[in-house]
Image (tube, rainbow, N blue to C red):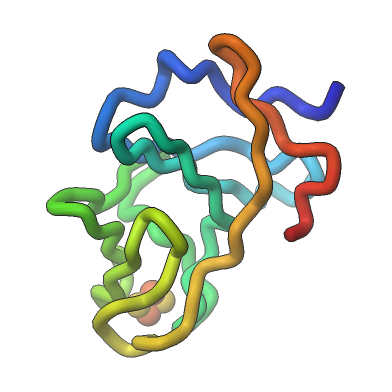
Amino acid sequence: MSERLCALSDLAEGSAIECADPREPEGATLVLLRSGDQVHAYLNVCPHAGRPLNWAPGRFLYAHGQLVCAAHGAAFRPEDGYCIGGPCRGESLRRVAIAIEGDAVHLAESADS
Ligand code: FES
C-alpha cells in the first residue's frame, strides 16, 4: 500500500487542503482539491515563480471553480491544473496520481505522473 495522504472526509465539497508530500522529506507539500465527487492532487508549486499556492499554512484561494495562487493571482482549473489566467497562463500545475480506498486518499503506486 502506498502512502496515505488524508481522509476523504477531510475534503468537503469545494475545499482545498494541504498535505505533506511523503516523497519529499524537505517539507514540500501537495494541494488536494475536491470538485464534486472528484479529488485532484497537485504539487503545491506554482509554475509562475515556484512559490506555494497557499497564503497561509493549509489555506488556499479556491472558489468559483478556480484555484488562485496567492502570490500573483494565477488561476487554475481544478480538473486538470491548467492555468486559465494570470502570469503563467497556458502552463499547468504538476498532477500527482492518487487513489481513493474507502475514506483514505493515498498516493497511487506510481505517483510521478
Ligand atoms: S508564483 Fe504563483 S502567480 Fe506568481
Give the left or right position of residue 44, taking residue 96 as reference: left
Give the left or right position of residue 78, taking residue 80 as reference: left
Give the left or right position of residue 50, taking residue 84 as reference: right
Residue 95 in the image: state x and y as whole percent: 60, 58
**Could you tell me which residue is drawn at 49 percent across and 75 percent down?**
92
The quadrant of the rendering that contains the C terminus is bottom right
**Could you tell me which residue is drawn at 65 percent across and 39 percent down?**
98
Residue 67 in the image: state x and y as whole percent: 30, 58
**Could you tell me which residue is drawn at 60 percent across and 47 percent down?**
29
Tell me where residue 106 sits by quadrant: top right
Tally the marks: 0
For residue 79, above or below residue 69: above
- Viewer-closest of 100 and 32: 100
For residue 21, above or below residue 10: below
The quadrant of the rendering that contains the N terminus is top right
Q: Quadrant of ligand 1?
A: bottom left
Tell me where residue 33 sits by quadrant: top left
Residue 97 in the image: state x and y as whole percent: 67, 47
- Viewer-closest of 90 and 46: 90
